Image (spheres, grey):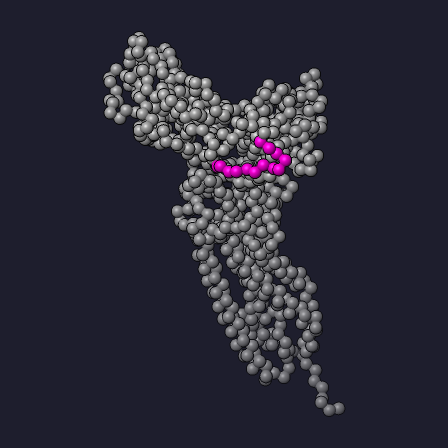
Amino acid sequence: MISDYKLNETYKNASFSVNLSRNVTWDSIRVLSIFDLLTESEFGHVILSNGSDLAPALSPDLAPSPASNDSRDKEGKFGPFRVPTMLDNCKILSNDYRIRWSLSVERDFIDIGLEAAIAIQNYMAFGWSDQKASSEDGSALGVCPDTIYEGSDPVGLVNNTKLIYGHRKDGVSFIRYRRPVVSVDTKYDLPVNYTENMTVIWALGLMRPPDTFRPYYSPQNHGGPMSVTYGHLVLNVSEQVNECLGPLDAADKEDQDLIIADANKPLVVTTGPAVHYPNPPNPSKVLYINKKEAPVLKVERGVPVRFSVQAGHDVALYITTDLIGGNATSRNKTETIYAGGPEAEGVLASPMELIWEPDRNTPDQVYYQSLYQKKMGWRVQVVDGGLSDMYNNSVLLDDQQVTFFWTLSKDSISIAARGEKKSGYIAIGFGTGMVSSYAYVGWVDDTGKGHVSSYWIDGRDASRVHPTNENLTNTRCKSENGIITFEFIRPLKPCSHNNRVECKNIIDPTTPLKVIWALGAKWSDEHLNEKNMHSETSHRPIRVLLMGGSAEAEQDLRPVLAVHGFMMFLSWGILLPGGILAARYLKHVKGDGCARGLLILLLGLLFAVAELRGLYISSAHVKLGLAAIFLACVQPVNASMRPKKSANGEEVSSKRHLWEYFHFIVGRSAIIVGIAALFSGMKHLGDRYGDENVHGYIWALILWFVIGTMIVMYLEYQEKQRRRGRVFGRSNWVLGNLEEEDSNDLLSPARASSQKDKQHSGLMEVQLEPLNR
């Protein structure tokens, strides 16, 4: 290190001063480089032939004029060493195209550098335009060589343009050529007046390959929008221009050393001499893959990669997050190793096979390196493969419009959803319907950025969609030709805070997960309105068996629930209340209404359990129903344990009193809880299926029980009147039984009186005894 100056910011065509350390002088420096200690990477260097060359190369105050910066002029004068890509001026033509130039010392020729981030089959065009000339002369149309116009005329064969240098690297093409300022070809070559503003034109386009009619490459029409694939501007080449901040970076580095892994073919790993290692400095021996020196390796998540390691026993291959390799732990650094290790070594005669399968948790970039020596390997690009390769299970949801993917882990689940048709967003929900469901929505905004968010939905309009704070990780969302795909990882048990709604969204792998879906045109993470509502949705949920890796459609249980509800209404609404009324007001009727009601009640329960494939005590309706059935079953047991009634004139026993109170409380409680179960069942039906008739059913049920209550009130009034009459009549009796018979008809007192009259009209034996002896 020659200076303690810290390069800890972003530099774009910046100039700054660096102070040398006290023990360093310029005359002792032969190579000056920028180096990163953390990654042991060099970002470029300058070779200094001797100390006298340094000052004009680095000091702007002593720099020569632009004209003397030519790499080799006619007189053989040399300035500081310059690579062919360095020119004095640079102007941006478009985001992917730049023009560089330098004038010679005598101003008799100009060097021009064209630099563009284009495909390898594309061309770069640049030239001066004569605005006064005609666009065509009728003999040819388009961009053509001079020979097209002049044929075999020697003048037409003049080519005053000389290629100086050219290269293509990482998706960027660079061409440097030289042309005279004033050409001898005055007919077709426009002279350049370097002191004036002149119009220049440029274009980028696709080359047409040779054919039988044209035995040479020729440029096709550039097409595309102006200022992107073609344009024009006014340029004065004598003015100093430097608009280029940093190098061009191509999005598609198609021509770099790239190897795409194939699951069916192993990648042969060997070693060889370092010639063009991409991350200098490096050892003399580096890794080769399929005979390419340290290439970029491209793999897909979910697709196994097979390595045939033949690099020698002293080179152990491993996949790591460390850029340098060579066992980061030995440098007190941390790294994550995904495959390989000390055992991943072999030779040509006995290669070792290493299999590595990247998953969706593998970072987008890792490195293949040697475990024993640093910087022998290079980068691994990890890209998304097919979702079926990345996930262990997948099923088509209802109507086959959305595919659901998942992979279970110990405490989490990885989930993906892909629409099978074009849409603006895709949503999946856990529940039987969008209402009362936990939903996950994936969409791509106007800037092309993907989003995945979680929601709790408790209604049918936009205001009832509430964002939640679920712990979603590794979220991704993309759109390819309008097909939306999103992914995320979530814990099986979201959180331990039960006061938050998302904490109740627990996934039990042993229980079928009910999944629904929806598609829509546009989504937003804020200010939702009716336009964000779905345009298509599933008609029924799919029961996904997470452990089994399969799914089945959930049946429409409304007919089943209708039968279950009718049977329960028949029991709780007619037979059981009727049995109670008969026991109280129609004692002479020996009916079995309560027994039949209890039988239908149990049949209704078994019917629902069988169709639902189990008894799930989760909803209020189920809890109320089971409580009511339990109380109803207690009553016949209680009746069988009824103590005997005391004889006439005897005091009622405490056991009889206790039994009567218990029988009264349990019976009335069973009816009340049963009626509550009926109403909760109606509400459950509406929440589950959104049936529009549920409210009508509820009002009809209310009316039924109001009528029943009015009948009971009337009967109770009649009972009180009858009792009052009986008390008045008994006041004149001297002999007789004052206690009520169990067989008294409390609903028809007249009929009961006639029966008593018949009993009293018979003969009676009495024994008289004197009062005083």
> Of 50 and 654, which appears nearest the observer?
50
Q: Residue at x 42, y 29 (%)?
A: 65
Magenta region: 14-26
Q: Is there any visible trace of residue 94 in the rendered image? A: no
- Residue at the extreme right: 773
x then y, percent, for residue 13: 47, 35
Residue 696: horizontal and vertical position, in percent? 44, 56
Which residue is at the front of the view, 468 or 562? 468
Magenta run includes residue 16: yes
Location of the C terminus by quadrant is bottom right
Displayed quadrant of residue 636: bottom right
Vertical placement of 772 versus 424: above or below?
Answer: below
The residue depicted at 53 percent of the width and 72 percent of the height is 716
- Quadrant position of the N terminus in the picture: top right
Closer to the camera in the image, 365 or 756: 365
Judged by its main secondary structure, the magenta piece is: loop
Residue 501 % position (x, y): 55, 53
